[in-house]
């Protein structure tokens, strides 16, 4: 554990410009800052900015950046503590990492406690697999049946959970792991009668690792054939695990991906393991979920080239095409390999040599646009409506390609493939691009409105296209903006309250205003990260000389430090944009308007989200048939409507919402 005092010494010693240039990034001075080509993505025009005064870096193209520790983390693909150690060695700073006392261990951050529990569980499952008769007879037999060698089983830390209902739960609690942590990680299930049972009983275990190697979750495959039991059981989402941000096997594949400058994407755990065993290690799995932006971002740190391997008899190819479109949208170079009928990466790798596997992939790699056209246009010649739908989907994919020359080549080839005018197809692609650009412009305008508080947005009634999902996104965005203001200005005065009875004035600071306003309406932030930032700001707001920006940027928790660095970098970008055209008041000068405005927007979105949920319930025939329940929901809706009117009256016509 690295204490805050040591982190402060490291941050004070590290010259961010020197560190970045030592990693081979060429920077040139521009005004008070430095600019250069971003080391995290391919670009020709410099968009990577370094501010020595703020000790922050930021790429205004790909968005990556932060303080000097975050730069080292990103560049070397290492954890926050590891990056701190790298910088400590560079500047000759000794890190005294000591054993925690019982009191410190009890007070340990809950996230770390969950990681510790997962590490213990991994070791427990591995030991059970190798050292118990049940583990050897069932778990090891299954892995060997799949063709996994012992060294492969050890490498991927595969394990086994016994068929007993609570073997793991009893052992873990006896070792001192709290029931609460075991339940929150998803390792155990709590019952109303107080019992704890093992979530993964009777299953072989596949640990899921973060890029730095921490065990963040588990997947368990059942061994008994039972139609009522799901084949795979996965850890539920938690404070440390979000399946949309993890890729199975990435920890073991990252060096191979960098070396090959290519990543292979498969679907399941055994696909990854079997290909590793066959000598192809630059492979990861989405673990059966649709590909997400968070997962793509992980791959993009290592390479811009990705090849998707599809099962030969995969029935879900069309459904997965949207996920592949996301790869194009993020600037990735995408190829597709369709395996022979009846084969998946696991079975194909098991029955072929490394050379045969590589040769097949090389011979059958197809460009994604061509592959998509072949899939979607198949059987549409006699159905103009289906063909038009397919062409529209293909046009949408081409429009996602960023390089104009590459895009024009695809337009020409696709026009020939579809026997249509190249000019017509080009017009359709350009229209898609304009629509996308307008959407991005509106999103940026909303972000700027949140920072400046001056942009007028449509009222909820004017926003006819907003769905419940859009509402949740809006709520999350406003919550993020409020938390950013807490990071920047926690101790800055928002307003002054005058007591007429004794004539005293009381100043209300940003963190206090936000905390008290939430408490007054019995609300709290949805994000655990945002809640923790607000709580810590309130804990330290009365400390002498408390500088919230410095406190959070140098925070020992990597997530808090990254959030704070992004918050400060984002403000710099917005300020520079606006001051090109006019002189605007600073945020500090306008806190008395910005903070109340954001809080009212936040409440308005909470109310609207609750109203949307109630309306959805009223669409349920079972609810409509229950007169008492229906009347109760309608009464709740009516009350919320009155609250919304009251909020709207305070906001006037200046409710901040994205278009």
Image: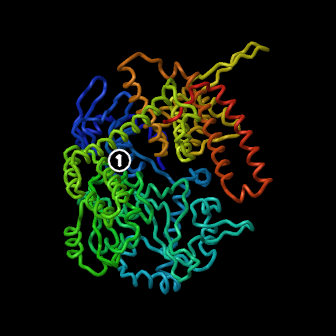
Q: Is residue 554 above or below residue 289?
A: above
User: Looking at the image, how many numbered discs can be counted on the residues?
Assistant: 1
Residue at horizontal 27 percent and vertical 32 percent from the top? 35
Quadrant in the rendering for residue 512 = top right
Q: Residue at x 38, y 20 (%)?
A: 579
Indicate the position of residue 603 as horizontal and vertical percent values. Answer: 63, 36
- 321 vs 398: above or below: below
Q: Residues within 10 Å of mark 1 (few under 14, many from 20)?
A: some
Depth check: 281 or 308 in front?
A: 308
Residue 33 drawn at (x, y percent): 30, 27
Q: Is residue 301 something that shows in the picture?
A: no
Residue at 54% in and 39% down? 464
* Residue occupying image coordinates x 21% and y 76%: 356
In the rendered image, residue 302, in percent from the top left (x then y), is placed at 30, 54
| Quadrant of residue 113 within the rendered picture | bottom right
Image quadrant where residue 144 sits:
bottom left
- Indicate left or right for 607 with 404 as reference: right
Does 595 sit above or below residue 430?
Answer: above
Q: Image height check: is 579 above or below 438?
A: above
- Residue 519 visible in the shown view: yes
Instruction: State the colouring used for the structure image.
Output: rainbow
**Residue of label 1:** 74
Nearest to the observer: residue 22 or residue 342: 342
Q: Position of residue 15 (x, y in %)?
A: 32, 34
Q: Mark 1 falls on what kind of element?
A: helix
Q: With 270 as the anchor, is 225 left or right in this view?
A: right
């Amino acid at each position: 554990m690295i204490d805050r005092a040591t982190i402060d010494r490291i941050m004070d010693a590290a010259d961010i410009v020197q560190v970045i240039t030592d990693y081979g990034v060429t920077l040139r001075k521009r005004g008070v800052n430095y600019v250069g080509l971003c080391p995290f993505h391919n670009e020709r025009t410099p968009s990577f900015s370094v501010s020595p005064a703020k000790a922050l870096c930021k790429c205004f193209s790909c968005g990556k950046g932060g303080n000097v520790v975050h730069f080292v983390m990103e560049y070397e693909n290492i954890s926050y503590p590891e990056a701190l150690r790298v910088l400590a060695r560079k500047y000759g700073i000794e890190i005294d990492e000591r054993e925690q006392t019982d009191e410190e261990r009890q007070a340990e951050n809950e996230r770390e406690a969950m990681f510790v529990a997962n590490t213990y569980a991994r070791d427990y499952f591995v030991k059970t697999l190798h050292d118990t008769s049940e583990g050897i007879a069932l778990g090891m037999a299954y892995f060997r049946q799949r063709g996994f060698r012992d060294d492969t089983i050890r490498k991927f830390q595969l394990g086994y959970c016994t068929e007993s209902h609570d073997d793991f739960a009893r052992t873990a609690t006896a070792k001192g792991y709290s029931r609460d942590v075991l339940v929150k990680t998803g390792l155990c299930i709590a019952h109303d009668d107080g019992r704890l049972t093992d979530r993964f009983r009777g299953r072989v275990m596949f640990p899921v690792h973060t890029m730095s190697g921490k065990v963040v979750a588990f997947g368990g495959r059942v061994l008994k054939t039972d139609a009522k039991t799901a084949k795979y059981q996965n850890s539920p989402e938690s404070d440390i695990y979000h399946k949309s941000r993890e890729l199975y096997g990435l920890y073991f594949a990252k060096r191979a991906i960098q070396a090959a400058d290519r990543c292979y994407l498969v679907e399941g755990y055994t696909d990854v393991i079997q290909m590793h065993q066959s000598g192809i290690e630059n492979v990861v799995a989405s673990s059966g979920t649709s590909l997400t932006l968070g997962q793509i971002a992980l791959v993009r740190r290592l390479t811009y080239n990705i090849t998707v391997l599809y099962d030969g008899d995969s029935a879900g190819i069309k459904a997965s095409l949207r996920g592949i479109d996301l790869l194009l949208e993020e600037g990735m170079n995408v190829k597709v390999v369709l395996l022979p009928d009846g084969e998946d990466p696991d079975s194909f790798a098991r029955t072929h040599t490394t050379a045969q596997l590589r040769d097949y992939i090389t011979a059958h790699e197809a460009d994604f646009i061509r592959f998509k056209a072949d899939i979607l246009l198949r059987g549409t010649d006699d159905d103009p409506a289906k063909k038009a739908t397919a062409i529209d989907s293909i046009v949408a994919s081409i429009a996602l390609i960023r390089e104009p020359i590459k895009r024009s080549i695809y337009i020409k080839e696709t026009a020939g493939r579809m026997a249509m005018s190249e000019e017509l197809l080009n017009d359709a692609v350009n229209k898609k691009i304009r629509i996308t650009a307008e959407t991005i412009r509106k999103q940026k305008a909303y972000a700027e409105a949140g920072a400046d508080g001056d942009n007028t947005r449509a009222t909820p009634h004017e926003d006819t296209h907003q769905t419940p999902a859009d509402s949740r996104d809006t709520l999350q965005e406003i919550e993020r903006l409020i938390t950013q203001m807490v990071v920047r200005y926690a101790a800055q005065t928002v307003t002054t309250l005058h007591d007429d009875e004794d004539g005293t004035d009381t100043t209300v600071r940003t963190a206090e205003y936000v905390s008290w306003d939430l408490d007054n309406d019995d609300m709290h932030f949805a994000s655990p990260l945002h809640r923790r930032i607000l709580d810590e700001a309130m804990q330290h707001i009365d400390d002498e000389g408390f500088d919230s920006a410095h406190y959070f940027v140098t925070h020992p928790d990597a997530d808090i430090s990254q959030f704070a660095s992004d918050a400060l970098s984002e403000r710099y970008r917005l300020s520079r944009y606006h001051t090109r055209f006019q002189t605007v008041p600073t945020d500090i000068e306008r806190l008395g308007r910005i903070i109340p405005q954001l809080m009212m927007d936040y409440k308005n979105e909470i109310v609207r989200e609750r109203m949307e949920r109630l309306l959805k319930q009223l669409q349920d025939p079972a609810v409509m048939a229950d007169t008492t329940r229906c009347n109760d929901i309608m009464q709740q809706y009516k009350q919320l409507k009155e609250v919304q009117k009251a909020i709207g009256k305070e906001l006037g016509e200046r409710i901040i919402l994205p278009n």
